Image (cartoon, helix red, strand yellow):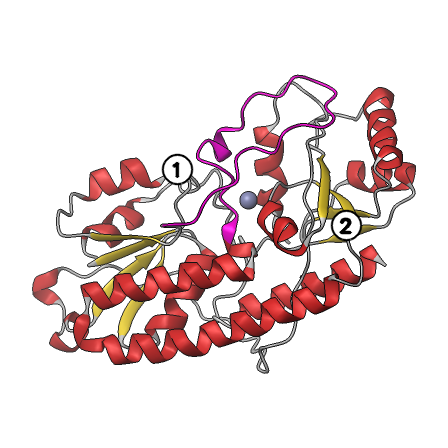
Amino acid sequence: MIPTHIGRKLGRQRSGILSLIALLLLSIASGCSQSNKNQETNTEQFPPVQEAASTPLEQSEKTKVVTTFLPMYLFTKAVAGDVADVKLLVPPSTEVHDYQATPDNVKAIATANVMVKNGLGLEKFLKDTVKNAQNPKLIEINASKGIKSLNEISPVEETTKVEKDHDHAEGNPHVWLDPVLAKQQVINIREGLIAADPKNQATYKANAAAYIQQLESLNSEFQQTLQKTPNCTFITFHDAFPYLAQRYKLQQVAVVEIPEDQLSPQDVQNAVNVVKKYKVKALFSEAGVDNKLLASLSKDLKLTLRTLDSLEAGQTDPQYYFKVMKANLETLETACK
Ligand SMILES: [Zn+2]
């Protein structure tokens, strides 16, 4: 359960109750990872940052890398293995969108050599945190470097005026949910780590190659599976899947924002109209979100409510990415039939 997730969304609600925005399509990949290890690495409480003077030699020899949120940790850990010391700033159970930095985050950045972020405006907490950390030697890796962001999807249906979502001021940030763009992020992380820590470049290259191979298999699996249901149309409650949809020719036709209060009969009617107009096949919520409004909406829409995972929270084993993406693919395959 991720109770903060829905709270965050509700907190983001504008006065508008329900906004329907053009959608994208999704697809899921399954396939490439053989090992779905469930063990959770305990990155939630990372050890207190040590003063340089008291750091044992053995530890100080490893490059210290801080990563912002779960997918960045997964990709960086996959590339670094054990040759660098990789930490996570946003705890893996916590939502990144409205995250507030802690004093420990400032300390971790102050003593880090490298910081890996998703970019595209996602990590709003970083600006002040990095400033407060006063670490002029910090090397920043922007994992989305070179990735062309999708701008706000142009609304096809909306019931109320929607302000520009500042989450997406620099384009939608959810690029890690497209295996092809995830590969680009892994490459960016690999190149950044090699530049910061050239003595371990052979390890970074080998680890990245193995992970990239898995991402490529995942991509193939998504392609093969979802080409059977072209232009599957869906509605989602978190605008996290435009890249995935574009990649695999799914159609996200609406993003329904969950209101803080009850949906009005008019809101429900508008959603029903969109479903009819676009022959929507699927309605996707998120893991851990237990909302009566979604349930009643899905009932009114006569569509099964299924969950897609945006990987913003979860487990810290790098293989967790493949486990979740394969589950997402199965969900899409079922929903789009
Ligand atoms: Zn998100």
Crowding near pointer 2: few (<14 within 10 Å), some, many (20+)? some
Question: Residue 271 at x, y = what percent?
Answer: 82, 30
Q: Could you say which disc has been placed on residue 278 in the image? A: none
Dot 1 amino acid type: Lys
Q: Quadrant of the N terminus?
A: bottom right
Picture residue at 61% right of the left edge, 45% below the top: 242
Q: Could you say which quadrant of the image residue 178 lies in? A: bottom right
Q: Is residue 47 left or right of residue 274?
A: left
Taking the image as drawn, is residue 244 in sight?
yes
Q: Give left or right: position of 254 versus 15.
A: right
- Number of marks in picture: 2
Left or right: residue 80 versus residue 167 is left
Q: Residue at x 72, y 34 (%)?
A: 256
Circle 2 SS class: loop
**Which image quarter is the C terminus in?**
bottom right
Height in image: 34 above or below 134?
below
Q: Which residue is mark 2?
A: 231
Q: Is 37 drawn above or below residue 88 in the view shown? A: below
What secondary structure is the magenta-colored segment mainly? loop
Comparing 228 with 135, the one in front is 228
Q: Residue at x 56, y 55 (%)?
A: 177
